[in-house]
Image (spheres, rainbow, N blue to C red):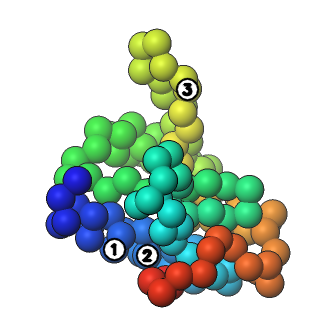
Amino acid sequence: MSKLSRQRGATYEREVANEIFDALGVRIRRNLKQYQVKDEGDLILGKYLIECKRRRKIAVYDFIEQAERACEAGQIPLVIMREDGGKSLALLRLPDLLTLLGNELDPHQSQGESSSEDS
């Protein structure tokens, strides 16, 4: 992975961590072990391990946009998808997920590891 890709990923991880803090009041830190140990998550929020992926173009936007267009007032768009031979995945917008998570989390509980790169 190039240095630019790592920087871009780290920036997005901090962006997600800050959005979680703004919505839930829970401070979450990046998991820096991900650079030293294989198969580590980017962020840990309570019992949730979060992988942050930022790409130029992700086709799932077409799926969620279709679901959003079909929604009536008060409905939350949710996409369930699966590749051939793969596992089913659920996709929803981050604000909708944060609403769900906010009902489970204690904002006074520390989340993740401390690092010099706090969000």
* Residue at 67% across, 55% down: 48
Dots 1, 2 in contact, CB < 8 A: yes
From the viewer's perspective, tell me whether residue 63 is left or right of residue 5: right
Looking at the image, how many numbered discs can be counted on the residues? 3
Residue at mark 3:
88
The relative height of residue 76 versus residue 36 in the rendered view (above or below) is above
Mark 2 secondary-structure assignment: helix
Label 3 neighbour load within 10 Å: few <14, some 14-19, many 20+: few
Residue that appears at 81% across and 63% down: 104
- Residue 77 rendering spot, x and y as whole percentages: 54, 46
Say if residue 71 shows up in the picture: no
Q: Is residue 87 left or right of residue 112?
A: left
Query: Separation of disc 2 and disc 3 at Cα?
Result: 27 Å
Q: Amino acid at mark 2?
A: Arg
- What's the residue type where badge 3 is placed? Ser
Residue 97, picture quadrant: bottom right
Residue at the extreme top of the image, as rendered: 85
Q: Using the rendered image of the protein, determine whether residue 102 is visible from the camera's viewpoint.
A: yes
How packed mark 1 is, by other alpha carbons closer than 10 Å (few <14, some 14-19, many 20 or more), is some
Q: Residue furthest front?
A: 36
**Label 1 amino acid?**
Thr
Judging by the rendered image, the residue that carries numbered circle 2 is 14
Dot placed on the residue nearer the N-terminal end, 3 or 1: 1
Q: Secondary structure at mark 1?
A: helix
Q: Quadrant of residue 6?
A: bottom left
Instruction: Give the residue drawn at x 74%, y 56%.
Output: 47
Q: Which of pointers 2 and 3 lies earlier in the amino acid sequence?
A: 2
Q: Disc 1 to disc 2, how far (Cα)? A: 5 Å
Q: State which mark lies toward you, 3 or 1.
A: 1
Residue that carries the numbered disc 1 in the rendered image? 11
Q: Classify 68 as above or below 80.
A: below
- Choose mark 2 or mark 3, whichever is in front: 2
